[in-house]
Image (spheres, rainbow, N blue to C red):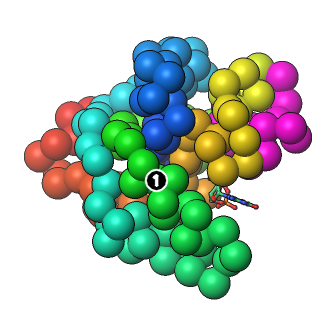
Amino acid sequence: MAVTRTFSIIKPDATRRNITGAVTKMLEEAGLRVIASKRIRMSREQAEGFYAVHAERPFFADLCTFMTSGPVVVQVLEGEDAVKRNRDVMGATNPKDAAEGTIRKALAESIEANTVHGSDSDENAATEIEFFFTPQEIVG
Ligand code: GDP
C-alpha cells in the first residue's frame, strides 16, 4: 500500500474542550503521522471557500458559522492509504452512527460539532492541503 497524504481539521468543538491532543493521539494510534499542523481562526471567507462543495446544502450557513466560532487545528497527515485510514478512524458523520473506537463515537458532540474533518479522496486531499499550507510548512 502506498504512503499518501490527507488533510485534517480538528474542529472548534474540540479546541473549546481542550481535546486536540486526545484527537491527535487517536490519529497517531491509527498509523497516521502529523507532518504539518497549525492552530488558526478561520475567516468566514475561508470557511465558505473550503466548504464551497456544500454551498447548496441546507446546513451550509450553520456549518460556516460553526467552523468560524473558535480556533481549529489544520493538519497534514501521512500514512499508508492515508485518506481511507483517516476516514476509518474518524467514523460516520453523525456520532450516533459512528462505530466504537472512532474519534466521532468517542468525542463528537453532534452531527455538526463532530470534532474532525478529513478529506474524502486523494484529489480533494491535495486541494485542501494547498488551501491551508505552503510546501515549506509540510515536513515529512
Ligand atoms: P464528513 O465528510 O463526514 O465530514 O461529512 P460531509 O462532507 O457530508 O459534511 C461536512 C460537514 O458538515 C460535517 O462534518 C458536519 O460538520 C456538517 N454536517 C453534515 N451534515 C449535517 C447536517 O445534517 N446538519 C448540520 N448542521 N451539519 C451537518
| Residue in the picture at 49% in, 77% down | 52
* In this view, 53 is above or below 98: below
Q: Where in the image, quadrant-wise, is ligand 1 located?
A: bottom right
Q: For residue 80, what is the image quadrant?
A: top right
| Residue in the picture at 88% in, 40% down | 97
Q: Which residues are magenta?
A: 87-100
Q: Secondary structure at mark 1?
A: helix
Query: In which quadrant of the rendered image does the C terminus lie?
Result: top left
Inspect the image, locate mark 1, and give the three-letter code of the amino acid beneath it. Answer: Met
Magenta stretch holds residue 11 = no
Q: Nearer the viewer, residue 26 or 21?
A: 21
Q: Mark 1, residues whose alpha carbon is within 10 Å: few (<14), some, or many (≥20)?
A: many
113 left or right of 130 in image: right
Q: Nearer the viewer, residue 35 or 47?
A: 47
Residue 127 at least partly seen: no
Image coords of residue 86 (percent x, y) = 60, 38
Query: In which quadrant of the rendered image does the N terminus lie?
Result: top right
Magenta stretch holds residue 94 = yes
Image coords of residue 102 (percent x, y) = 73, 27
Residue bearing the label numbered 1: 67
* In this view, 43 is above or below 140: below
Image coords of residue 64 (percent x, y) = 48, 63
44 left or right of 5 in image: left
Q: For residue 89, what is the image quadrant?
A: top right
* In this view, 67 is above or below 1: below
| Residue in the picture at 62% in, 43% down | 113
Image coords of residue 24 (percent x, y) = 47, 22
Q: Nearer the viewer, residue 42 or 50?
A: 42
Q: Nearer the viewer, residue 123 or 80?
A: 123
Q: Classify mark 1 as within 8 Å of ligand 1 or not, answering yes or no.
A: yes
